[in-house]
Image (spheres, rainbow, N blue to C red):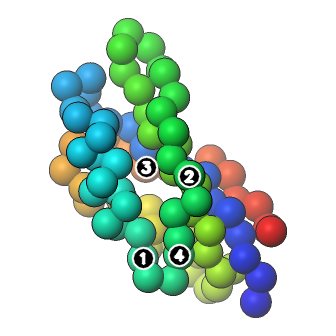
Amino acid sequence: MGEVAVRIRVMPESTEIDLERLREKIKGAIPSYARLHAMEEMPIAFGLKALIVVAIMGDKAGGTEELESNIRKIPGVESAEVEEVGLL
């Protein structure tokens, strides 16, 4: 089984969301079979910033569904969408 890098764009509900707090909650939402590789802010518009999350995980059946679902359940998250998945 190989590994894949998953890039997810996490959009907060508003500009009032504390991104540092959101970062900590995302770290806690990473399943045990995956590991956080990087997380960075990306300006969107009018002060709104997305968090770009990169996680490394095995290329197992079910893919990224659990990871996406865990992030979407975090209070303050508007959406979490996979932008890219690449084999390492």
Circles 3 and 1: CB atoms closer than 8 Å: no
Residue 13 vertical placement versus 29 (above, below): above
From the viewer's perspective, is 46 left or right of 39? Answer: left
Q: Closer to us: mark 4 or mark 2?
A: 2
Task: Give the residue displayed 51% in from the left and 29% down from the top.
Answer: 42
Q: In the structure shown, which secondary structural element does the residue marked by tag 4 occupy?
A: strand
Label number found at residue 34: 4
Instruction: Give the quadrant of the N terminus.
Output: bottom right
Q: In the structure shown, which secondary structural element does the residue marked by tag 1 occupy?
A: loop
Q: Amino acid at mark 4?
A: Ala
Q: Which residue is mark 3?
A: 80
Q: Closer to us: mark 2 or mark 1?
A: 2
Residue 80 vertical placement versus 35 (above, below): above
Q: Which residue is mark 1?
A: 31
Q: Earlier in the sequence, mark 2 or mark 1?
A: 1
Q: Closer to us: mark 3 or mark 2?
A: 2
Q: Which residue is mark 2?
A: 38
Task: Give the residue displayed 41% in from the left and 26% down from the top.
Answer: 49
Marks 3 and 1, how far apart in space?
15 Å
From the viewer's perspective, is 57 left or right of 43? Answer: right
Label 1 crowding class (10 Å Cα cut-off): few <14, some 14-19, many 20+? few
Marks 3 and 4, how far apart in space?
17 Å
Circles 1 and 4: CB atoms closer than 8 Å: yes
Marks 1 and 4, how far apart in space?
6 Å
Q: In the structure shown, which secondary structural element does the residue marked by tag 2 occupy?
A: strand
Q: Earlier in the sequence, mark 3 or mark 1?
A: 1
Q: In this orientation, which residue lies closer to the viewer: 55 or 71?
A: 55
Q: Is residue 50 visible?
A: yes
Task: Give the residue displayed 80% in from the left and 68% down from the top.
Answer: 88
Residue 44 vertical placement versus 77 (above, below): above
Q: Closer to us: mark 3 or mark 1?
A: 1
Label 4 crowding class (10 Å Cα cut-off): few <14, some 14-19, many 20+? some
